[in-house]
Image: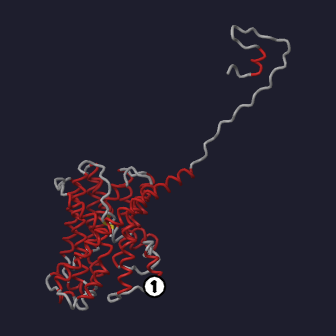
Amino acid sequence: MSASRAIGHPGQGTVPGSGARLAALDGLRIVAALGVLCYHYLALDSGWGEPAAAVFPVASAYAVYGWLGVEIFFVVSGFVICMSAWDRGVGEFAASRIARLFPAYWAAVLFTAGVLFAWPEVRGVKAFVDVVVNLSMLQGGIKVPHIDDAYWTLFVELKFYALFALVVLRGVTYRNCVVFCTVWTVAGVVAPTADSGVLSFFAIPTFSLYFIAGIAFHLMRRFGPNAVLWGIAGLQFVLAQSYVQGRMISNLGGGVAAQTPVWPAHLVIACGFLVMAGIALGTFDRIRWRWLRHAGEVTYPLYLIHMMAGLTAIHRFRHDVRPVPLVLGVTAFMVALAWLVHRLIERPLGRRLRTGMRRAVHDIRRMSAPPVPVPAVPAQAPAPESEGIVTSAGPGGRSGEDSRRHPWGRR
C-alpha cells in the first residue's frame, strides 16, 4: 500500500539531513509492512481453514493489531508526498506518482490473478474483466472487486493525490499546505454528519487525518516546529483515537473486536505519531544504515503481492508443513519475489514510464501555449517620382537614384 513510497515511496531529499530522514522513514515503513503481513498470516482465519488463534495462540494475540500498519503508512505517505511535490508542477507531480505506483502494481495484479485462477482455494476471480479493471487502480470507485483485498488502500492514496494536486496547482508553499490541512480537517469533521456522498468521498474522514499529520510533520522538518503545526498534528492524533474502535470492528469483526483489548491499538498509533515527530525534529538523524533504504524499497511490492497469494500458499500447504516453518517460508518467498519485482519491473519500467509521461506533459504544454505573434513587415513606400534630381555622392557613395530605390536608408 502506498502508504508510500505511496505506501513505500522514499521521495526526494530536499532539506538538510535528507539521507538520515529517509533511512528513518524506511525503517518505520518496514515495521508497518511487517505488521500488516503478520496480521494477514497470523491473525486471519482464511488461510488456515480454522481460527488463527488456535494455530498461533500467542502470536495471533499480537498480530491482531497489525492492521494498524496501514494507518502508519498513510502518515508516512503524507510526509513523503509533501516533500517530493515541492518545486514541482502538476504535470511533473502526476508523472512521478503514476510512474511510482503502477509498474509494481500491474505486476502484482497479474501475479495474484494467476495464483487465484490456478488455485482458487481461499478465493477465486469471478470474471476476467475484473482483472482488467483492477489494472486501472480505479476499481474502488466503480465497485469492482479487488483482486487482492489489500488494494483498497491504493484508491485512498489516489484520492489524496488528487486533492493534493490542488496545492501543487497553486504552488506547494508553507501557507498553501497549512490552508490545505485546515480545510481538509474541517471537511473530515463535517463529512460524517453532512449527508453528502461527494463530501464523504473526498474528505475520507477515517484516514485523511493521517495524511494531514504527515504533511504537518514534513513542514516541521522543513521549516521548524511551531504552535500551529503542533496543533494540526495533535488534532489529527486526537481524531485518530476516536476512530480506533470502529476500525477494529471493520478489520476483526464485531465478535473478535469485542474480545480484543483496545488500548494496544491506541498505543500503536501513539508510537507511530511519536516516531514521525522524532523524524520531523531530527531525533533519528544519526540513523544512516544503507540497508534500511534497500529494504524500504521492497515494502511497496511486498505489500502488493503478499496477501491473497500468501494466504493461498498457506492454505494449500497447511497440512504438509508445520505452521511456523510455513509462515516463515511463505514470508521469505514473498520478500524475495518483491525484490525481483522491484529490480526487474518497478525500477526499469518506472523510469521508462516517467520519461514518457514527462514528454507527454511537455507536449501538452507546448501545444497549449498561445501562438507567438509574428511582427508585421511594414510595406515599402512608393519611390517619389522626381526626375532630374541628383544628390551628391562622395567617394564610393550612392546616387540619389539609389537612395530612392531604398527609401528606408542605406542597406
Q: Is residue 332 left or right of residue 186?
A: left
Picture quadrant where residue 214 is located: bottom left
Q: Please rate how many residues cluster around mark 1, counting C-alpha atoms within 10 Å: few if below 14, some from 14 to 19, many from 20.
A: few
Residue 209 visible in the picture: no
Number of dots carrying numbers: 1
Quadrant of image for the C terminus: top right
Residue at the image position 60 percent from the left and 42 percent from the top: 372
Which is more toward the observer, 319 or 136? Answer: 319
Residue 75 visible in the picture: yes
Quadrant of image for the N terminus: bottom left
Q: Secondary structure at mark 1?
A: loop
Residue at the image position 30 percent from the left and 59 percent from the top: 10
Q: Position of residue 371 (x, y in %)?
A: 61, 46
Q: Amino acid at mark 1?
A: Ala
| Residue beneath disc 1 | 127
Q: Residue furthest left?
A: 58
Residue at the image position 31 percent from the left and 49 percent from the top: 14
Q: How is the image coloured?
A: secondary structure
